[in-house]
Amino acid sequence: MRRHAPVLLALLAAFALVACGGPKRPPAAAGPPPPPPPDEELIGGSGGRSDPDAVDWGPDISPVDSDSSLGEVYLGDEYGEGGPLADVLFDYDRATLSPEARATLEQHARWLLSRPSAHVVIEGHCDERGTVEYNLALGDQRARAAMEYLLSLGVPAGRMTVVSLGKERPLDPGSNEAAWARNRRAHFVVRR
């Protein structure tokens, strides 16, 4: 046992250091707190934020019709609603366009064709039911269905991008049919 005592003591000392978190760092100098991380949710809506009033949209967001520079984004309100292009809604577990969705997309095509500098990101969204993987695939199908219809109406492919957000950024955080119906959508984020 005496032969193993130094090894045992070394192991216990190492374990104690790991359990206590290792050497302590000196406290940070007093001063203002570091800035929060950049908002990764800028494009596309609420992103499930618990406090939407804490969002600083900043001065770099302006309507598409303004004289702003290229690359700026118009999102509408803090949830991505109220932009120049309305959401297109889908039935449960479907990515087919209803007659109402087609009519809305026809208006979107006219709007986009009259503004040749506008580029649109088409986001596919789902309700909270189903797995993450399933909803990402379904969101992609919804965004692509909207893009394909806009392509058939003459909007150039180079002015459209699709992204699936699945169930990760619900517009309505509720857990009922009314909320789910609002969350099954293609959302349009316009850039210049």
Image: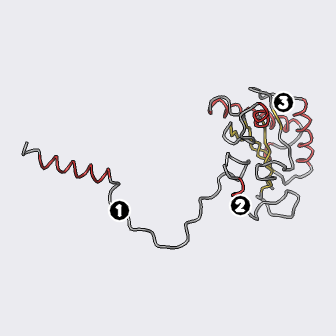
Q: Quadrant of the C terminus?
A: bottom right
What secondary structure is found at the residue carrying circle 2?
A: loop
Per the image, label 1 sits on a secondary structure element best described as: loop
- Mark 1 surroundings: few (<14), some (14-19) or many (≥20) residues within 10 A: few
The tag earlier along the polypeptide, 1 or 3, is: 1
Helix, strand or loop for disc 3:
loop
Label 2 to label 1: alpha-carbon separation: 36 Å
The residue under label 2 is: 56
- The residue carrying mark 1 is 24
Q: Which comes sooner in the sequence, label 2 or label 1?
A: 1
x and y percent of residue 34 in the render? 55, 66
- Residue beneath the point at 82% across and 60% down: 62
Q: Amino acid at mark 2?
A: Asp
Give the distance between the C-alpha atoms of the residues marked 2 and 3, in whole angstroms.
35 Å
Q: Are marks 1 and 3 in contact (CB under 8 Å)?
A: no
Q: Residue at x 68, y 52 (%)?
A: 51
Q: Quadrant of residue 182?
A: top right
- Mark 3 crowd level (few <14, some 14–19, many ≥20, 10 Å Cα): some
**Residue occupied by mark 3:** 97
Residue 114 placed where, x, y %? 92, 50
Q: Earlier in the sequence, mark 2 or mark 3?
A: 2
The N terminus - image quarter: top left
Image height of 191 relative to 130, above or below: below
Camera-nearest label, 2 or 3? 2
Residue 124 lies, with reference to residue 115, above or below; the image says above
Q: Amino acid at mark 1?
A: Lys
**Label 2 Cα neighbours within 10 Å, binned few <14 / some 14-19 / many ≥20:** few
